């Protein structure tokens, strides 16, 4: 199988002490260097096979968007390697990334923020078409844009409207059409349905899946909770504090979760067959600060099974069954 994306030991951090006064502090008469660093992504590994959907799931602040923005090189990785379609893009400059971005597009949570409010929607979709195909005439580009809008369910007679004249679901469809306009191989969808009503969420997810087959796409799909990715994923990575703590084929992750955090996430999904009076399990405590990473396993202070070793030693990722990985001292 061809791999669309390989992410190897990827790290990303943000230095909050950017000016000299933040960097040096006076402590008991001495000047000491004290930097505040947010360790947002802490050594993650995964691959996406061509035509597959890999989902990253985890609580707010665990580093999902930072991972996405690093992969598409809006941020330069701190460490690690990103291989896209066989090419190492880790150290490419912004200019060198331009032709790559044609093959790697992003869809955002809030389509309103990513659509130019002063452009008619036909122009929003035409813009990337013309940018990447400078030989096309405006007329040809418009024809293509209207075809794409129709594919995502926006009628051609709506072409001269502006983004604010559409509903949230329709705006997300326009964002999808724009991403498709350059015929990418990989779409990174960062919580594309989180801002939408539940009834609309399913429509957009179905649209994304239909397009996957029609355009032979791979997806990196980002979501807060496992229920959203249940139907669409081939593989899932569960993220916690900048690490993937468990990674498996969807069926294995849902039927046979290994990591205590995955089990918690799964038990917090309400299901139809469940006792209707039972409250969903709440995940206790908060995700620790990525500025001061915990010693040992990052999950130890919230884990019901934590042993002494979990507070001392960071677990390494192990393949415990075929293509089923977890980082946990229980295994
Ligand atoms: N530009 C930045 N400067 C400093 N810290 C940042 C920056 N961007 C993100 N962070 C921090 O990095 C960590 C990871 O953030 P990120 O946005 O990747 O999380 P997320 O998993 O996408 O969360 P959410 O589900 O809320 O979107 C957080 O602690 C966040 O505060
Ligand atoms: Mg995010």
Image (tube, grey):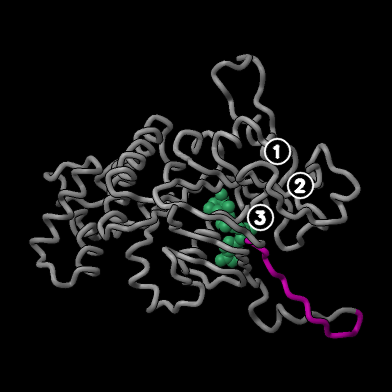
Residue for point 75% across, 55% down? 316
Label 3 environment density (alpha carbons within 10 Å; few <14, some 14–19, many ≥20): many
Above or below residue 329? Residue 200 is: above
Identify the mark at residue 243; answer none if there is no mark. Answer: 3
Magenta range is 28-41
Residue 2 among those drawn in magenta:
no
Residue 118 shows in the view: yes
Residue that label 1 marks? 258
Residue for point 60% across, 69% down? 80
Residue for point 62% across, 66% down? 11
Above or below residue 88? Residue 248 is: above
Q: Nearer the viewer, residue 201 or 67?
A: 67
Residue that label 2 marks? 328
Q: Where is residue 205? Give x, y as percent.
A: 38, 38
Left/right placement of residue 189 relative to residue 116 reads right
Q: Nearer the viewer, mark 3 or mark 1?
A: 1
Above or below residue 207? Residue 184 is: below
Q: Where is residue 159? Give x, y as percent.
A: 15, 50
Q: Nearer the viewer, residue 157 or 133?
A: 133
**CB atoms of marks 1 and 2 within 8 Å:** yes
Left/right placement of residue 54 relative to residue 205 reads right
- Could you tell me which quadrant the C terminus lies in? top right
For the residue labelled by badge 1, is the local secondary structure a helix, a strand or a loop? loop
């Amino acid at each position: 199988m061809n791999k669309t994306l390989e992410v190897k030991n990827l790290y990303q951090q943000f230095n909050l002490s950017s000016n000299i006064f933040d960097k040096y502090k006076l402590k008991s008469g001495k000047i000491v260097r004290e930097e505040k660093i947010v360790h947002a992504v802490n050594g993650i590994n995964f691959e996406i096979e061509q035509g597959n959907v890999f989902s990253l799931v985890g609580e707010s602040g665990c580093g999902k968007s930072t991972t996405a923005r690093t992969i598409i090189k809006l941020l330069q990785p701190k460490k690690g390697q990103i291989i896209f379609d066989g090419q190492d893009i880790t150290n490419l400059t912004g200019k060198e990334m331009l032709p790559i971005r044609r093959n790697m597009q992003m869809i955002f949570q809030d389509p309103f923020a990513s659509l130019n409010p002063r452009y008619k929607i036909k122009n929003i979709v035409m813009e990337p078409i013309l940018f990447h195909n400078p030989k096309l005439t405006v007329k040809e580009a418009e024809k293509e844009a209207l075809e794409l809008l129709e594919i995502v369910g926006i009628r051609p007679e709506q072409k001269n409207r502006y983004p604010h004249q559409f509903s949230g679901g329709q705006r997300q469809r326009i964002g999808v059409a724009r991403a498709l306009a350059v015929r990418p191989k990989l779409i990174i969808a960062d919580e594309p349905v989180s801002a939408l009503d539940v009834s609309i969420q399913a429509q957009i997810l179905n649209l994304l899946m239909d397009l996957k087959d029609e355009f032979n796409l791979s997806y990196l799909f980002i979501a807060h909770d496992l229920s959203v990715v249940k139907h669409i994923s081939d593989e899932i990575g569960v993220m916690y504090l900048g690490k993937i703590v468990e990674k498996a084929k969807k069926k294995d992750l849902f039927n046979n979760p290994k990591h205590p955090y995955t089990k918690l996430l799964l038990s917090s999904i309400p299901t139809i067959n469940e006792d209707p009076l039972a409250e969903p399990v709440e995940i206790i405590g908060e995700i620790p600060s990525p500025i001061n990473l915990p010693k040992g396993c990052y999950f130890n202070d919230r884990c019901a099974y934590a042993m002494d070793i979990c507070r001392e030693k960071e677990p390494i990722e192990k393949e415990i069954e075929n293509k089923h990985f977890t980082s946990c001292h229980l295994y």
